[in-house]
Amino acid sequence: MSGLQAVRGMNDVLPDQTHAWQDLERILKETFAAYGYREIRLPILEKTELFARSIGEETDIVSKEMYTFDDRNGDSLTLRPEGTASCVRAGIQHGLFHNQQQRLWYLGPMFRYERPQRGRSRQFHQAGVEAVGWPGPDIDAELIVLTSRLWRALGLTSPELQINSLGNSASRAAYREQLVEYLREFADHLDPDSVRRLETNPLRILDSKDDGTQQVLTGAPSILDTLDAESRAHFDGLCGLLDSCGIAYQINPQLVRGLDYYNRSVFEWVTGELGAQGTVCAGGRYDALVEQLGGRSVPATGFAIGLERIVDLVRGEYQAPPRGLDVFVVSLGEPARRAGLALGERLRDAGLAVQQHCGEGGWKNQLKRADKSGAEVAVLIGDDEIADNAVTVKPLRTPGGQQSVPVSDVVRTLNELLNKEKRGFMIERENHG
């Protein structure tokens, strides 16, 4: 069995890395709750038809990137490549959208068969928000204001907001005809993927990263010139709301989304800090999707955040350190081991993080392990301590000698010591901030 490794593009998150994920997840949940969004938990597997109908069979995701297989009953199943379709399916199935408005969020792994690179894995994680039941631009603005608050909570300054409008289905179809007519004249200058998309999904050509294709696109017609009146009013309303909140944005007429269900306002938060994979959050309206999947016609909008990209973005900046151990209990002898186990539970009841020495080892060996554990304080228990109904408290990270403390007073003593150390850490952080 030697030599077994994780599947390519599906990565382990090791203990030294998980605290950054935990901090991010905590901030996400707190921010979503602050705006009244509630969590929904969705299955990883769905029927393949769900994504073919919602994302679009001509999109790269459905045609090339999904993990799809037949189960024992012959049903075609797919590991979810994104969360919106699953969320809408669940809302329809359980009646969440019937004469109701819903603010929902979810978090978890998604799967796409792509070439692994920085910021893009085959198993990746997204946090998504979906707001169902509001037709106006105010809910679009709320989503963007929410993400702006999230960046501030994470200490991020580099994401920049880009917005666009895709119009309704009729104006989008009219623009598609104009775009195809223009691009056919320059087909010899387009990259191979764009030539293929010219027949299947021409709006995606606007998102091409090929330099030659981008040069061709400089003269392309703008989708904003074909907007219907309602879509134009909606987009102008969104811009006005963002202006009133002081949210800076750039109107990017070439901004499209890679999924067929989007209409009207779309947006992305992008950064130059992550190379080619610079989009850290993307979303927009999908007013026809609920009806398309079998529900009643309900307006909706949402976004998804790539968590790997956010973790990568905050790496190197200050992160709150993971909560370390407060106390390491060192015990020598069977009576001391029993007393140490009981004391550890008492300290945990008081809110402290405690690690117990297990196995054999003398004082010197155990104290080495205590120091290696990262604990702030060691509590030593041996025959003398058992006889005196006391413990020895030894600071491990700050100056000061060890002291004998009665068992009845150990919680207060440890709290005083640890609070002093935490205050010292905060002062040091402020001095270096």
Image (cartoon, grey):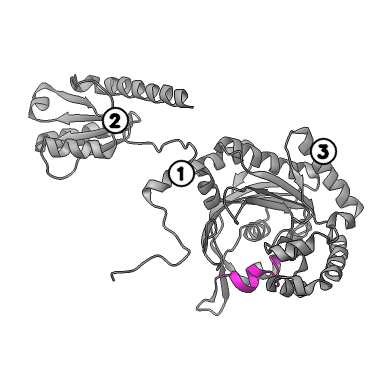
- In this rendering, does residue 117 appear at all? yes
Q: Quadrant of residue 262?
A: bottom right
Residue placed farthest to the right in the image?
229
Residue drawn at point x = 28 percent, y = 34 percent: 375
Kind of element beneath mark 1: helix
Q: Is residue 206 above or below residue 364?
A: below
Mark 1 highlights which residue? 20
Magenta residue check for 158: no
Determine whether, in the image, residue 97 is placed left or right of residue 123. Answer: right
Mark 3 highlights which residue? 240
Mark closer to the chain start, 2 or 1: 1
Determine whether, in the image, residue 226 is placed left or right of residue 385. Answer: right
Residue drawn at point x = 74 percent, y = 74 percent: 195
Kind of element beneath mark 2: loop
Q: Nearer the viewer, residue 4 or 291?
A: 4
Mark closer to the chain start, 2 or 3: 3
**Structural distance between the alpha carbons of marks 2 and 3:** 52 Å
Percent position (x, y) of residue 250?
Answer: 75, 45
Span shown in magenta = 54-67
**Structural distance between the alpha carbons of marks 1 and 3:** 36 Å
Q: Nearer the viewer, residue 269 or 141?
A: 269
Q: Identity of the amino acid at label 3?
A: Gly
Q: What is the crowding at mark 1: few (fewer than 14 residues within 10 Å), some, or many (at least 20)?
A: many
Q: Identity of the amino acid at label 2?
A: Glu
Percent position (x, y) of residue 176?
Answer: 83, 66
Contact between labelled residues 3 and 1, with CB atoms less than 8 Å apart: no
Q: Identity of the amino acid at label 1?
A: Ala
Determine whether, in the image, residue 429 is placed left or right of residue 356. Answer: right
Percent position (x, y) of residue 136?
Answer: 81, 45
Mark 2 highlights which residue? 376
Mark closer to the chain start, 1 or 3: 1
- In this rendering, does residue 295 appear at all? no
